């Protein structure tokens, strides 16, 4: 008799990170259970049999994703075949990546495989109608924000709050002093961290704006140092060509947490990195740009006035956001100077970040999620 198996599916760098923690917890709780599916290098290193990896090809928005359609369709066909083959997996665990994953959930439903959604779509922010699809296709939602629980229960969707997986991922983040030693940055220097995103399109649209802002700031603060977190899904050459004129910039491959900890302030794209910076207590300015077509789609589907997770989660503007036409070098320079020069503004952000952390649960998210996955799969001991 073959060993039981669970399929996991993640399509972006953040999903790969959280999927890896879930894989490790599943292996610890059910050593005989095989994990396989789609993810990245971190899930593979955690012991998952990698059938497909599209994390390096993740796109920044609707129109940017068009060129990825053939790759994603091939990935979908391979995963659907694995769902339908005998013996079938005991459960399918979807991790974020909703455009792809909700389609795969339909195939799992037809194959009689229970579907668990870990880090579900942010229906409270946009595309609220997806909750009907989730109710029809998903056996259990593992909510990562506490307010999601009531939302799903009202809609008749089975849900459990497990907490946000970043609480586990950040447990090993270095101290400020250790991060500066790791990056070779002087302890007394004023450091600005750059987090231009984990997708090539994000870097191409946002990093030139960051560079323009820093060039303006540098004239008055020539001793300032810069550190850039280079995502594993972005090539070094893709960022290097946008850094001319800034002087030495410390590049930190896979070092987002060190950059955030070492920095007095970070300039960051909208996404998971904003929540990482908040939980690590580093003040930030958020900037983001997408294509005009993607912007039109987002405006048509969005229900809230913010783009960053700290503002979305707290329901108010606690960090400045510069989006689309407002994301210019001049405006980013102004917001950055304001925060650098106003200690009370930085303290206000940190106070909001402490409130945010208190809402996201407690560490041990991977273990709680794994136990619920095994129970849904009928594999709990």
Image (spheres, rainbow, N blue to C red):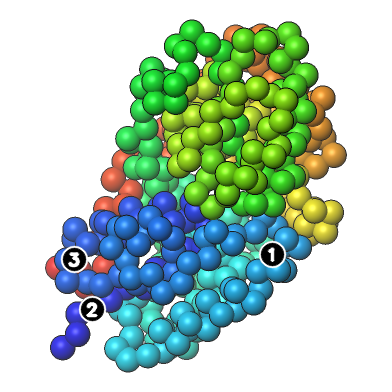
Looking at marks 3 and 2 on the same chain, the residue that comes earlier in the sequence is marked by: 2
Q: Measure how far apart labels 2 and 1 are at the Cα level.
A: 34 Å
Q: Position of residue 317 (x, y in %)?
A: 67, 31
79 to 264, vertically: above or below: below
60 to 190, vertically: above or below: below
Residue 174 seen by the camera: yes
10 Å crowding of disc 3: few (<14), some (14-19), many (20+): some
Looking at marks 2 and 1 on the same chain, the residue that comes earlier in the sequence is marked by: 2
In the picture, measured across the screen, residue 167 lies left or right of residue 318, that is left
Find out whether the residues at labels 3 and 2 contact each other: C-beta distance under 8 Å.
yes
Q: Measure how far apart labels 3 and 2 are at the Cα level.
A: 10 Å
10 Å crowding of disc 1: few (<14), some (14-19), many (20+): some
Residue depth check, mark 1 versus mark 3: number of the one nearer the observer: 1
Q: Position of residue 225 (x, y in %)?
A: 58, 18
Q: Which residue has dot 1 on it?
A: 65
Find out whether the residues at labels 2 and 1 contact each other: C-beta distance under 8 Å.
no
Q: How many marks?
A: 3
Q: Measure how far apart labels 1 and 3 are at the Cα level.
A: 37 Å
Which of 208/236 is in front?
236
Find out whether the residues at labels 1 and 3 contact each other: C-beta distance under 8 Å.
no
106 to 245, vertically: above or below: below
Q: Quadrant of the C terminus?
A: bottom left
Q: Which residue has dot 3 on it?
A: 30
Question: Of helix, strand and loop, which one carries label 1?
Answer: helix
**Disc assigned to residue 4:** 2
34 to 306, vertically: above or below: below
10 Å crowding of disc 2: few (<14), some (14-19), many (20+): some
Question: Of helix, strand and loop, which one carries label 2?
Answer: loop
Q: Position of residue 62 (x, y in %)?
A: 72, 62
């Amino acid at each position: 008799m073959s060993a039981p198996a669970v399929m996991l599916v993640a399509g972006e760098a953040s999903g790969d990170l959280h999927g890896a923690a879930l894989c490790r917890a599943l292996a610890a709780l059910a050593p005989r259970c095989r994990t396989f599916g789609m993810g990245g290098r971190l899930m593979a290193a955690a012991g998952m049999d990698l059938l497909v990896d599209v994390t390096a090809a993740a796109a920044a928005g609707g129109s940017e994703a068009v060129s990825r359609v053939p790759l994603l369709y091939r990935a979908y066909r391979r995963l659907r075949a694995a769902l339908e083959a005998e013996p079938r997996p005991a459960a399918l665990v979807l991790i974020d990546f909703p455009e792809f994953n909700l389609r795969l959930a339909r195939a799992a439903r037809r194959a009689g495989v229970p579907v668990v959604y870990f880090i579900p779509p942010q229906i409270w922010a946009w595309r609220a109608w997806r909750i009907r699809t989730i109710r029809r296709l998903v056996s259990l939602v593992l909510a990562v924000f506490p307010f999601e629980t009531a939302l799903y229960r009202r809609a008749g969707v089975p849900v459990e709050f497990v907490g946000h997986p970043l609480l586990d991922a950040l447990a090993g983040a270095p101290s400020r002093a250790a991060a500066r030693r790791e990056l070779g940055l002087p302890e007394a220097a004023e450091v600005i961290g750059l987090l231009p995103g984990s997708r090539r399109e994000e870097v191409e649209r946002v990093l030139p704006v960051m560079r323009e802002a820093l060039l303006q700031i540098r004239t008055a603060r020539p001793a300032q140092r810069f550190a850039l977190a280079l995502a594993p899904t972005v090539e070094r050459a893709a960022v290097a060509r946008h850094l001319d004129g800034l002087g030495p910039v410390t590049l930190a491959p896979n070092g987002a947490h060190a950059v955030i900890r070492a920095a007095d302030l970070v300039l960051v794209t909208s996404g998971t990195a904003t929540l990482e910076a908040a939980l690590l207590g580093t003040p930030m300015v958020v900037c983001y740009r997408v294509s005009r077509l993607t912007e039109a789609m987002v405006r048509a589907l969005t229900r809230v006035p913010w783009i960053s997770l700290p503002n979305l989660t707290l329901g108010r503007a606690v960090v400045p956001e510069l989006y689309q036409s407002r994301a210019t070098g001049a405006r980013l320079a102004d917001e950055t100077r304001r925060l650098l020069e106003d200690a009370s503004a930085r303290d206000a952000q940190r106070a909001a970040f402490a409130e945010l952390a208190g809402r996201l649960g407690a560490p041990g998210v991977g273990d709680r999620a794994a136990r619920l996955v095994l129970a849904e799969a009928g594999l709990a001991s």
